[in-house]
Image (cartoon, rainbow, N blue to C red):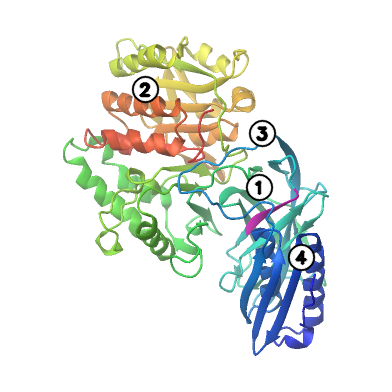
Amino acid sequence: MGAAPLSPSSRTNYDDADRDWAFAVGKLARLRPYVFEIHAESASGMIALSGSVVSEDIKDVIEEVFRDYDPDARLTNDIEVTAPFRSAEHDDDFGTAEARPKQTVVVDRYPRFESGQQPSLGERFRFQVDLAQDANDQPPFRMELPYDWTTVSVDSQIVSAHLRFAEGADRRKIVIERDGRSIAALYEAEVVGVTDDGLVEIQAVFNCRGRYSGIAKSSFKALERKEAQREAPSAPAAIAIHPAATSPDLTIQILSVGATKSWIWVLDAPKAKSLGKPGRSEVVELGDAESFATDLLKECPDLQTGRHQNKLRGIGEKIWAATPETFRSLYADMRREFGAAFSIQIVTDEPHVPWEMMHPNAQSGIADPDHMFMTHPVSRWYASIEGRMLSSLAPGSIASFVPVYGSGSRPALQAAIEEGQWLVSTLGAEARDPTWESFTTFWSTDIPKERVAVLHFAGHGDNQPARIRLSNGYVSCDEVNGSVKLGVRDHPFVVLNACETGGGAFRLGLVSGWAASLTTNEFGGVLAPLWRVEDECASQVVRSYLGSFCKGVPIGVAMLRARTAQRNASATPFAYVCHGDVNARLG
């Protein structure tokens, strides 16, 4: 590693410059095996970096070291990547899948939040986030890595209602090394608030190569003593990192901060770093999200065919207006730069608003705007649940449950019956006994020996409470619990083609509803409608989706084709919400 003619004397902004310099030098020393040569020169408030390293990841981390050391300096980074092990950038075009390595290993690391100082209101607070080898009170982050991996870089972005960061200072990289060591992400921010209990609450949102990987949470007590005391974490979601997975082109993370009426939007677009406004996060006040969504959607089930699209565009424009300017600017720039084909992943613990339905308005500057989910491959995932967002789904059988109802208040659904028959004749599905007993034992005590890839239901359903009706009774989402083993074993994709089964509601702080219950129990994805749908059109949507998905078409693309094909028929295709990795495919 070449000489770096910098010293603490070149710093003017920190009283503890010696400590900062020691931290920077120590971090650079850890990078020595991956650096051929580094030069850093400082003059007139500028730091100039040059040299050569083995990967884009290491280049970015070195830049972060010097930005952390002197945030006010102007920095130029002319470091060359001369022998990359694995580039941090994707070289493939939009929508092109990367090959999964033939051999992988599973590596567990544990999130760790540490600080050597006390957070104090109005003062600067320094802390670090790491993914360490030693177990602690956080659940492990499970990473599936190439068998010959050496290092892997994970983006860590801090979300907190109690901290104010300088522009760009809320996002750093953690470098994980094969020998068990790691290089933590260091943060500094102003403490602008605490909870009633005197806590500074922090969420770390992790992304690996542009793909959402999970969240860890912790908090620090603001106490008048030498060191801050870290509180036990609050049920963070377990994650899995798949560096070989195909990353979405735009990830939208919508996370609660403080009270549930405040939401922070965190955006990640690896190929659009120069687009949009500076910064990739913004807090919005949404009010009562459930009431907002209910007021928007309450008329949707009764929209008249032929007149539905104008009304739905109005709803979409209201959703667009509720998004932050940071998002609208980035999205408009990406549309101009890349067209309308890029994929979008939504990750949220706000379960009510169908953000996928947003429609840019006339002031957006977007040519020929349309609903997001009629333009892009898009899918969503719940952030505040345990369970993994799988990057691929294993092939297997299709199990179909289609009740034939008798007379009464819930008549037979002829199109649903024909849908089940089509799955059997065209896709080779197995028609299962559509009783409560058969359905509930199928996923718990009577799981077939053959792997199940798709679990399909077509029939009646309700949203309040969230339940589906079998031939002899109801199954509610609350029955998806620890006794359900099918998700853990096979991770099948679930299609619930029933009225009003896609929505969710908060119960005691946990996301509820079918999608949350199923994905919490490790089902690979869920497709379900938000409101009452028309039987015939609903059947066509599901046939189109499954026809593509079962041929290996990614979730987001398959759903885009299914929606657009039926959009003129009725409001039904607008009702469907898809949960899962937007780029995941069967096979």
Q: Is residue 39 above or below residue 405?
A: below
**Dot 2 corresponds to which residue?**
460
- Choose the circle earlier in sequence order: 2 or 4: 4
Say which of marks 2 and 3 sits in front: 3
**Magenta residues, start to end:** 150-156
Q: Secondary structure at mark 1?
A: loop
Q: Nearer the viewer, residue 168 or 343?
A: 343
Between the residue at mark 3 and the residue at mark 4, the CA separation in whole angstroms equals 30 Å
Q: Secondary structure at mark 4?
A: strand
**Dot 1 corresponds to which residue?**
236
Mark seen at residue 36 = 4
Residue 147 on the magenta segment:
no
Compared across the picture, whether 253 is left or right of 287 comes to right
Q: Which secondary structure class fits the magenta region best? A: strand
Say which of marks 3 and 4 sits in front: 4
Quadrant placement of the C terminus: top right
Residue 151 on the magenta segment:
yes
Q: Is residue 464 visible?
A: no
